[in-house]
Amino acid sequence: AQSVAQPEDQVNVAEGNPLTVKCTYSVSGNPYLFWYVQYPNRGLQFLLKYITGDNLVKGSYGFEAEFNKSQTSFHLKKPSALVSDSALYFCAVIATDSWGKLQFGAGTQVVVTP
Amino acid sequence: KAGVTQTPRYLIKTRGQQVTLSCSPISGHRSVSWYQQTPGQGLQFLFEYFSETQRNKGNFPGRFSGRQFSNSRSEMNVSTLELGDSALYLCASSLEAPDGAFFGQGTRLTVV
């Protein structure tokens, strides 16, 4: 069975500081990994994905994520956080035999203070 | 290119009633998935449709059902509503590939 874990319920960071949101996964076979962001009363917005290739993936709004196969992690990063980055972030995985189903982590609330 | 459109955005229903939610995917996307989001359970997969066929199903009771039309538009239905069905229902569409899914704004269902 596949699963995703986001160990932090909330991450607090000052504006201008680096932001990291952690994600670890467990799947059989090669993982397809995604990050989404959700603003209040809105749907999920796609940030980035790892399918294959370079371990460092660049996405929208200055976000990037590092895939680490040995540690089964896919942490989301941003070098300099903005107040507008305050939102709920979800890591997700789909298994190779179930492309239409996303398994989400519990989500991490990011709070960026001015 | 238009995104995923869900209607209605908000619904209030009474226990025991049924409800139908609609989703129009991004043009060219043939896979449509539905998710339920609640504060307690997070994001849970309901089902996925591809070319009018249900391809995957999550662990929800039979009161939750869906369908997909030939133009890829999808509907989900919840019968005999319970208070616990109050949630944000999200629809997502994707290409036939592990390429990521694109979500609509959701339908906020409140059961009273």
Image (cartoon, rainbow, N blue to C red):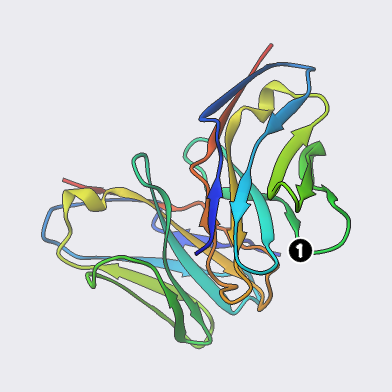
In the rendered view, would you say A53 is above or below B86?
below
Which element type, helix, strand or loop, lies under badge 1? loop
What percent of the width, then of the height, locates residue A61?
78, 39
Q: Residue furthest top?
A: A114
Q: Is residue B3 rendered to the left or right of residue A52?
A: left
Q: Which residue is mark 1?
A: A51
Q: Amino acid at mark 1?
A: Ile
Q: Is residue A63 rendered to the left or right of residue B35?
A: right
Q: How many marks?
A: 1
Residue shown at 38% from the left, 68% from the top: B58
Q: Chain of mark 1?
A: A
Q: Residue furthest front?
A: A70
Q: Callout 1 environment at 10 Å: few (<14), some (14 to 19), or many (20+)?
A: some
What percent of the width, then of the height, locates residue A51?
76, 63
What percent of the width, then of the height, locates residue A11?
60, 24
Residue shown at 75% from the left, 51% from the top: A70
Instruction: Specify the quadrant of the image occupied by residue A23.
Output: top right
Q: Residue furthest right?
A: A54
- Quadrant location of the C terminus of chain A in the rendered image: top right
Residue shown at 60% from the left, 73% from the top: A99
Q: Nearer the viewer, residue B60 or A97?
A: A97
Residue shown at 60% from the left, 62% from the top: A27
Q: Nearer the viewer, residue B109 or A108?
A: A108
What percent of the width, then of the height, locates residue B27?
65, 74
Q: Nearer the viewer, residue A80 or A32?
A: A32
